[in-house]
Amino acid sequence: INANAELHIYNIANKSIVKNYTFPDAIFSTTTSFLNDIVVDTVRQVAYMSDTNIAGNGAIVAYRRADDAAVRFQDPSSTYANTSFIVEVNGTAYPSITNPVDGIALSSDAARLFYSAVDGNTVYTLNTSYLRTALDNAAAFVPSTLFDKVQAAFFRNTASDGLMYLPTAGYGQVAFGVFNPSSELGVDTFSDSNFYGSLGEKVNRSVVSPAAPWVDTMAVVPWTSLDAICGCGADEVCNSGNVPAQLGHPTSNCLPDDNCPTLLPATLYGFSLFFTANNLQLYFAGTMDFYSDPNMFVYRVDYYYSVTPAKPVRPATEMKLALTFLGVIAFLSFVIIVILIVARISRTQEQNADPGDIDLNYRRYSESRKSFSGRRN
């Protein structure tokens, strides 16, 4: 479509458009841009989007709702396609697929952005504070000032499309699609231990039909109640006697509201991972069959945990604890030094005292004792 890219903010509750914003050509080209994936920092009201530009110069775009500020960050080393990498799907090479940055994920604290190109095996990360600072003076933003801020988060052994940060599975887990696995197709995960410490549970790979190997868009829905786990209606509750068998959500798992069992541990929690899978590789190759078998699928995989993983201490917290400890040590050291100095001064004064003063003080002390004894008698 030869037109400017637009962002629409929609209120689901009252089914109304809250805001429409049209991006200028300098942010999303009207002829080559492909506004693809999006993640949102709901607290700061900042959206981060990937431009899978057909000209190859992919970019990350940050947009702030409060003042309509937008910046485009394109980096040849991280947002462009890796031309030396050949995309393979189900063991078949597709050298014509040269898509730049596509998948994008935001950490649960919105402090770190993860992104990657389809044509490449590296997932990169960038601290979002740099992009938010750039929004303060968007007109003067120069992308090259952030080149050295980009880090390689991890490497995959497969091409991939969408990314998803899994906040309720533990801290620092990134899910990505697997196009060319050695044994099965599906969703794999990376533990972000380099940035947020060790994790608790590990999410297992979810098997996807070979008929649609291109795992694309992902979404996470955290469980907020047992009813949500079982998918029960408003007037029903979860039959919680056998959770593993209920993950298919048949209607028999739901009971009337007045018969609610309480067999599940209180610490049970989890999330549902939704993702789409398709045959996009065939579309790029011009061989997709639009008339026989379906090419698009939506999957739901549920994960639950009986024990909540311990939240690791993050680097910022570790730094605060270290500084607090050093502060206490410094204060105690200061107090000890002051005590030693006072003691040394006192000893010095005693050693330098005049003997005459000592004798006079002794006589005064003796006379005081005699006077006190006389009054007692």
Image (cartoon, rainbow, N blue to C red):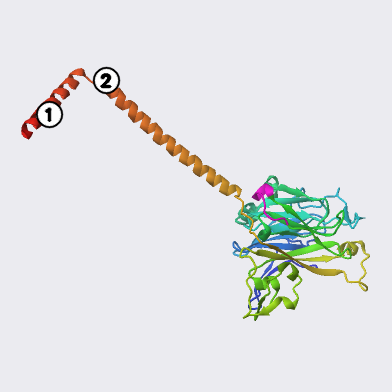
Residue 356: quarter of image: top left
Say which residue label 2 marks.
352
Describe the element under mark 1 as helix, strand or loop: helix
The residue positioned farthest toward the front in the image shown: 377
Kindly tell me whether residue 238 is visible in this rendering.
Answer: yes
Taking depth in this image into account, of 163 and 273 the one nearest to the observer is: 273
**Is residue 116 rendered to the left or right of residue 225?**
right
Q: Which mark is residue 369?
A: 1
What segment is highlighted magenta in the picture?
A: 193-202
Kindly tell me whether residue 10 is visible in this rendering.
Answer: no
**Is residue 148 rendered to the left or right of residue 334?**
right
Residue 36: quarter of image: bottom right
Specify few, some or many for label 1: CA neighbours under 10 Å numbering under 14, 14-19, or 20 or more.
few
**Is residue 330 rendered to the left or right of residue 374?**
right
Where's residue 132, x and y in %?
Answer: 62, 55
- Could you tell me which quadrant the C terminus lies in? top left
The residue positioned farthest toward the top in the image shown: 355
Taking depth in this image into account, of 311 and 260 the one nearest to the observer is: 260
What amino acid does circle 1 point to? Answer: Arg
- Could you tell me which quadrant the N terminus lies in? bottom right
Taking depth in this image into account, of 147 and 273 the one nearest to the observer is: 273
Residue at 88% over, 71% down: 294
- Asked whether 345 falls inside the magenta stretch, the response is no
Residue at 62% over, 51% down: 312
Where's residue 315, x and y in %?
Answer: 60, 47
